[in-house]
Image: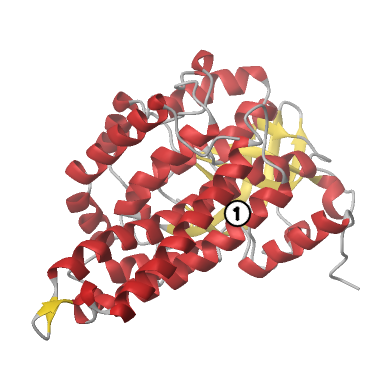
Amino acid sequence: MNFRLTDEQRQLQATARDFARAELPAIAVELERDNKPPSHELVLRYAEMGFLGINVPTALGGLGAGNIEALVVLEEFAKISSAVAFPIFESSVGPVRAIEYFAPAALRDRVVPMVCRGEMVIAVSMSEPDAGSALTDLKTKGVVRGDKIVLNGTKRWCSGGGHSDAYLVYCRLSDEPGARSIGAVLVEKGTPGLSFGPNESLMGFRGIPSSDLNFDDCEVPVGNIVVPAGGFRKLMEAFDLERCGNATMALGQASGALDDVKEYVLQRKQFGKPIADFQAVQIKLAEMQMKVDAARLLIWRAAANAEDGLPSVLESSIGKCFSNTIAREVTGDALQLMGAYGYSKEFPMERRLRDSWGWGIAGGAIDIQKTNIASAMLGRRFDQRR
């Protein structure tokens, strides 16, 4: 058991940190202001730098590194903002990994390299108006007709909705009840029958536009079925890695806030001395550091134990739950220490606080993670309908 990053991992971390700090803060401000995703040109730049598909095999266009490397890079981008980090998230721990693991070879070999080259951004579309935490209640359905599958229904809260190039859509693919009929289909933007609702107006996540997806006799090739009916367990196994990404996005808000507030308390003077000299500030800083370090270790444990596959639901849920929780606490404490400067939109602290609350909702709310944890601990599933 070794808690140190290797020389290669530290070099990758430093490269990501230097790039993010030098080139992305001003872009993050623009994305926040305009609520627009990173430009195609910026995503291509990420690809040129090797930041897309870090843990995707080289045969599919990725860097061929591990999950730890992907999360180390993701945190450095997330420290700047959730929006500038989102393409990294989607390419390394998002729906592209489900496509890599489970899609037919022809679809996998076409799509995954495009993501790694920065030519395609893929979003996941899971929730519906009546199916969020109760995901097996979803109603969007696909029916095979010849060499096509025809989709009808409405998806909600799709991060990237209307802007991403393709969507991994969770839907019913048979008439079996519950999870037994659920699979996933890749639907590319511009497919007839796919339309989008207006951008949601959210508390945070500006620069990660969200919208409804509407399917009205939307036809895609049957070869776009990533996971057939009955593959719900596979989809959720792939989602365990996405939980680690979600947790790292939350961690980035906390660790970025801590970096900024450490600098602030050394410079800000009151009563004739830096506020870092006050014991109350020192205690708060220590508490924040402990939370950030603990969250990072829990996330890395889940990722390290899954280097040859996908993380366990227990370890990924623990990492997500804890990181989501402490991100809200650390960003709140950092904002308080910075006072009006933290509360001002002229500085990134208040944005980090708002985004931290979003990561504790997206990808399975904090309390749902606790249910997952208890279920894995006891080795049994709990039926919330009874």
Residue closer to the observer: 35 or 2: 2
Q: Secondary structure at mark 1?
A: helix
Q: Is residue 328 left or right of residue 214?
A: left
Residue at image location 43% in from the left, 51% down from the top: 162
Q: How many marks?
A: 1
Residue sticking out furthest to the bottom? 271
User: Residue 248, how many percent across, how many down?
Assistant: 48, 50
User: Is residue 94 visible to the viewer in this orientation of the structure?
Assistant: yes
Residue behind mark 1 = 319
Q: Is residue 213 left or right of residue 277?
A: right
Q: Is residue 119 left or right of residue 379?
A: left
Q: Is residue 198 above or below residue 273?
A: above
Quadrant in the picture for the C terminus? bottom right
User: Residue 178, how many percent across, how many down?
Assistant: 85, 55
User: Residue 366, how many percent across, how many down?
Assistant: 62, 67
Residue at image location 37% in from the left, 74% down from the top: 284
